[in-house]
Image: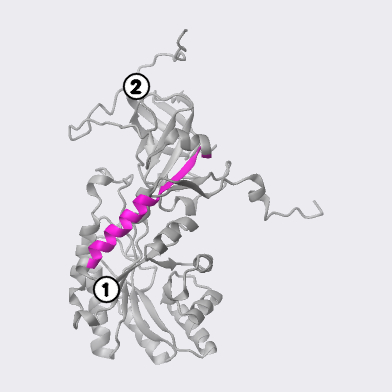
């Protein structure tokens, strides 16, 4: 029987830029990823379609327990709170709830989502710079923890608390000028210029709220653990100042999130898996900063961490299928796949690792991987050394679990199925592929059109 012929491709001379080794003399290699947690990629696509998001329960649980074990060794009085904005799929939130995490939310929508998932008010932390009066009232009535972001919000909380006839315990968000990362001073009250202390004095004078917590969130994808050491030392110093000067007892300190995943930022020189700090490094820096706290360990405040990206990113995969090959004007090979930045917003930030889902051969050459959108910015990888691909080949985009399924959109194509593979190998849909009916369900055509 005759073997199928390889499609003819006109020869072209291309200046070879990348070479077989990187700048450090190491050979670049790609290993096919034919299975995800024991499930064949081809079988997943045949059953659930392409593109397809796949989440690994095993990885989520492993990362969560690793962080908890490290914290327990150095500061046992801690509590994780799952960051809903990072990934608020119900199944994902329930996994972290089952592992003991609270819910950290930043909007009324996320607050209601947590309640519908059965999270009690007492295990919800309400953050964010734009809390509505209605969500504040719900949170105060139910006993959720609220971190105040600005003076107008402080006044609003006082008004609602007065109307309800209660004096709730609250926290304030504090921002710091740190030596190694930019200052996120648009959130909370600044420590160095005295604004945070003024906010505390204003709260105490009002006599409608009780200050019991301090909150900060120093940034996102923080690659320098020493920034946490510096921030934690400052927040501990502030807690000591409030105790010594005003007699206030801080019951909890919330350090937010910001831990990096193993993704590689476009601006990074080295691969993310070589430069991303370990959980151990972050925890060591945080607990060293807490050494400024006074009193016995039994009097230490409860420590919250709102870790999101570092727990979920590596648990997420996106399977996509090659739709076309072409040559660009500079001679590079280009590949068009069936997913793009409307599903994978993080491709704007990261050089995602992308691997074939089947064995391959042929000569590696510089390749651009484009999505299906009619937009020039729909680029998943602008330049990657890659083997030849043919239409129908599957690719697996790795480390996509954070922010993509909260920031994706229905632009040109609808959003695909999302599945989760359990620790015992069972695979189930956790979000169904959208249809045109889903998209148009909230639309109306006025009778005058």
Q: 128 or 395: nearer the eye?
A: 395
Q: Which residue is mark 1?
A: 77
| Furthest-top residue in this view | 1
Q: 168 or 8: nearer the eye?
A: 168
Viewer-side label of 2, 1:
1
* Label drawn at residue 361: 2
Say whether residue 119 is magenta.
no
Residue 380 vertical position relative to residue 437 in the rendered view, above or below: above
Say whether residue 61 is magenta.
yes
Q: 361 or 207: nearer the eye?
A: 361
> Could you tell me which secondary element the residue under label 2 belongs to?
loop
Residue 236 vertical position relative to residue 228 in the rendered view, above or below: below
Main secondary structure type of the part rendered in magenta: helix
Residue 390 vertical position relative to residue 435 in the rendered view, above or below: above
Residue 110 is situated, as x and y percent measured from the top left of the image, at 50, 65
Q: Residues in magenta? A: 48-72
> How packed is label 1: few (under 14 Cα within 10 Å), some, or many (20 or more)?
some
Residue 39 vertical position relative to residue 180 in the rendered view, above or below: above
- Pointer 2 and pointer 1: residues touching (CB < 8 Å)? no
Residue 252 is situated, as x and y percent measured from the top left of the image, at 32, 77
| Furthest-front residue in this view | 424
Q: Is residue 372 visible?
A: no
Residue at the image position 45 percent from the left and 10 percent from the top: 3
Of label 2 and label 1, which has the lower sequence position?
Answer: 1
């Amino acid at each position: 029987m005759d073997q199928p012929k390889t499609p003819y491709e006109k020869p072209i001379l291309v200046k070879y830029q990348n070479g077989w080794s990187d700048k450090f003399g190491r050979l670049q290699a790609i290993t096919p990823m034919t299975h995800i947690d024991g499930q064949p990629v081809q079988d997943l696509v045949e059953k659930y379609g392409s593109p397809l998001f796949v989440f690994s329960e095993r990885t989520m649980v492993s990362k969560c327990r690793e962080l908890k074990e490290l914290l327990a060794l150095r500061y046992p009085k801690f509590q994780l709170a799952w960051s809903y904005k990072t990934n608020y799929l119900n199944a994902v939130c329930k996994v972290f709830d089952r592992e003991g995490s609270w819910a950290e939310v930043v909007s009324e929508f996320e607050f209601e989502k947590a309640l519908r998932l059965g999270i009690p008010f007492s295990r919800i932390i309400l953050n964010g710079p734009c809390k509505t009066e209605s969500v504040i009232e719900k949170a105060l009535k139910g006993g959720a923890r609220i971190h105040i972001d600005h003076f107008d919000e402080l006044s609003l909380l006082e008004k609602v608390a007065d109307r309800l006839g209660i004096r709730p315990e609250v926290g304030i968000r504090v921002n710091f000028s740190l030596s190694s990362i930019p200052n996120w001073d648009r959130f909370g009250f600044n420590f160095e210029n005295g604004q945070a202390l003024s906010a505390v004095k204003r709260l105490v004078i009002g006599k409608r709220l009780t200050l019991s917590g301090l909150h900060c969130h120093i940034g996102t994808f923080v690659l320098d653990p020493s920034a946490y050491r510096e921030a934690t030392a400052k927040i501990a110093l502030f807690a000591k100042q409030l105790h010594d000067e005003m007699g206030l007892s801080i019951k909890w300190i919330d350090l937010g999130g910001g831990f990096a995943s193993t993704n590689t930022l476009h601006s990074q020189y080295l691969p993310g898996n070589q430069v991303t700090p370990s959980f151990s490094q972050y925890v060591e820096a945080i607990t060293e900063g807490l050494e400024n706290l006074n009193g016995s360990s039994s009097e230490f405040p409860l420590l919250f961490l709102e870790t999101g990206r570092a727990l979920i990113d590596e648990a997420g995969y996106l399977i996509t299928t090659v739709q076309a090959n072409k040559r660009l004007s500079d001679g590079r090979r280009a590949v068009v796949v069936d997913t793009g930045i409307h599903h994978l917003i993080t491709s704007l930030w990261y050089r995602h690792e992308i691997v074939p889902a089947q064995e391959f051969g042929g000569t590696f050459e510089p390749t651009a991987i484009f999505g299906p959108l009619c937009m020039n910015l729909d680029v998943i990888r602008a330049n990657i050394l890659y083997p030849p691909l043919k239409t129908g080949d599957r690719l697996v985009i790795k480390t996509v679990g954070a922010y993509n399924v909260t920031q994706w959109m229905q632009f040109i194509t609808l959003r695909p199925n999302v599945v989760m593979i359990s620790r015992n190998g069972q695979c189930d849909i956790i979000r169904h592929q959208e249809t045109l009916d889903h998209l148009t369900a909230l639309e109306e055509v006025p009778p005058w059109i």
